[in-house]
Image: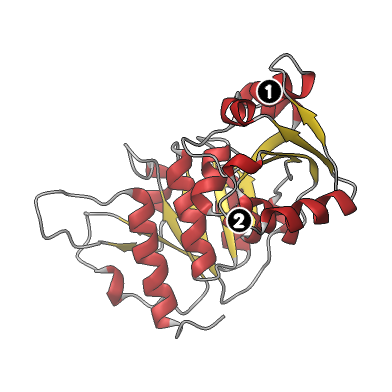
């Protein structure tokens, strides 16, 4: 299959891709960048509205890219080839994989989140780093959470670095964005208990029952959870720290707590 070849940095499509590196443009246009074979494949699988795809064969890592391009072209997605230096110019990665696409972002509403009285939920308050958010999404997918609620957003969930760190889990995990107050009201309405890690308790995270409907609440990287959640938590627990450091990275703490819940539930899907 023949594709249009773009060799000029002055091409309007290239200029647009460069603009989408800026969150302001992504927010205004409600678009994002997907980059890499795995991310594009999972985006298609989970219904992302992909508008355009750009590729550079010189950067391909294998032979699966061409069938993917043909699949997208058959779906009516505009596919174009970029000169290698242009792909590197618009890429987020130090080592591009040769595939990059433009997709519409989805709206994630609390009312659309699955309700399960015995569900396992994750609530993240003001997480600021896209890499941490992506890692948390990956862990959330790994234990098959019922839903992931993002409160008081600190970063753009469709930041290409968050998508990359999630390895596409952003598309598979049921998501909602809302305020702290809205999240708490929703959890209370649906009888979901809240768990928060804090050093100010003697109850270890392995000592509480996580087989009931529960939401694990985690906070910002630097400041942790706000008083809003600390005072509202039904299950305050501590993650023991045996060394000199007094806390874990938020994505690591999230994984520890999620996997304890999964362990207690027998790792059932």
Asked whether, in this view, residue 224 is left or right of residue 190, the answer is left
**Cα separation between marks 2 and 1:** 25 Å
Q: Which of disc 1 and disc 2 is earlier in sequence?
A: 1
- Considering every residue shown, the one lying at the far top of the view is 10
Name the spot of residue 35 as percent of width and height, x first: 61, 43
Q: Position of residue 40 (x, y in %)?
A: 67, 51
Residue 145 sits in quarter: bottom right
Q: Is residue 152 visible?
A: no
Tag 2 and tag 1, C-beta contact below 8 Å:
no
Q: Secondary structure at mark 2?
A: helix
Residue in front for this viewpoint, 12 or 186:
12
Q: Is residue 85 left or right of residue 262?
A: right
Up/down of 57 relative to 204, above or below:
above
Q: Quadrant of the C terminus?
A: bottom right
- Residue that carries the numbered disc 2 in the rendered image: 38
Quadrant assignment, res 226: top left
Specify the quadrant of the image occupied by residue 46.
bottom right
What's the residue at 39%, 80% (across, down)? 263
Residue at 60% from the left image edge and 75% from the top image edge: 117
Residue 166's disc number = none
Nearest the eye: 234 or 100: 100
Answer left or right for 204 relative to 96: left
Q: How is the image coloured?
A: secondary structure
Query: Does residue 183 appear in this view?
Result: yes
Q: Which residue is mark 1?
A: 25
Q: How many C-alpha atoms fall within 10 Å of the one at disc 1: few (<14), some, or many (≥20)? A: some
Q: Position of residue 266 (x, y in %)?
A: 45, 86
Give the percent coordinates (x, y) of residue 192. 54, 67
Q: Residues within 10 Å of mark 2 (few under 14, many from 20)?
A: few
Q: Nearer the viewer, residue 228 or 74?
A: 74
Residue at image position (59%, 68%) is 146
Give SS at disc 1. Answer: helix
């Amino acid at each position: 299959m023949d594709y249009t070849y773009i060799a000029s940095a002055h091409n309007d499509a290239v200029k647009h891709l460069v603009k989408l590196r800026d969150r302001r443009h992504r927010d205004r246009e409600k678009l994002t960048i997907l980059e890499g074979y795995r991310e594009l494949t999972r985006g298609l699988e989970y219904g992302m509205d992909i508008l355009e795809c750009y590729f550079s064969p010189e950067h391909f890592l294998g032979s699966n890219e061409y069938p993917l391009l043909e699949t997208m072209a058959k779906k009516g997605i505009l596919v174009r080839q970029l000169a290698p230096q242009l792909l590197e110019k618009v890429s987020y990665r130090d080592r591009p994989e040769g595939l990059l696409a433009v997709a519409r972002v989805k709206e994630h509403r609390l009312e659309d989140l699955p309700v399960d009285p015995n569900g396992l939920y994750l609530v993240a308050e003001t997480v600021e780093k896209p890499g941490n958010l992506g890692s948390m999404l990956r862990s959330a997918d790994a234990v098959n959470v019922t839903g992931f609620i993002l409160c008081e957003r600190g970063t753009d969930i469709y930041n290409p670095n968050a998508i990359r760190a999630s390895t596409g889990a952003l598309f598979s995990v049921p998501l909602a964005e809302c305020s702290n107050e809205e999240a708490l009201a929703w959890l209370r309405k649906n009888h979901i208990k809240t768990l928060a890690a804090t050093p100010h308790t003697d109850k270890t995270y392995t000592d509480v029952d996580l087989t009931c409907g529960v939401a694990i609440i985690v906070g910002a990287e630097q400041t942790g959870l706000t008083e809003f959640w600390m005072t509202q938590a039904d299950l305050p627990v501590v993650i023991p720290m045996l060394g000199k450091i007094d806390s874990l990275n938020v994505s690591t703490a999230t994984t520890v707590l999620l996997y304890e819940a999964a362990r207690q539930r027998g790792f059932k899907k």
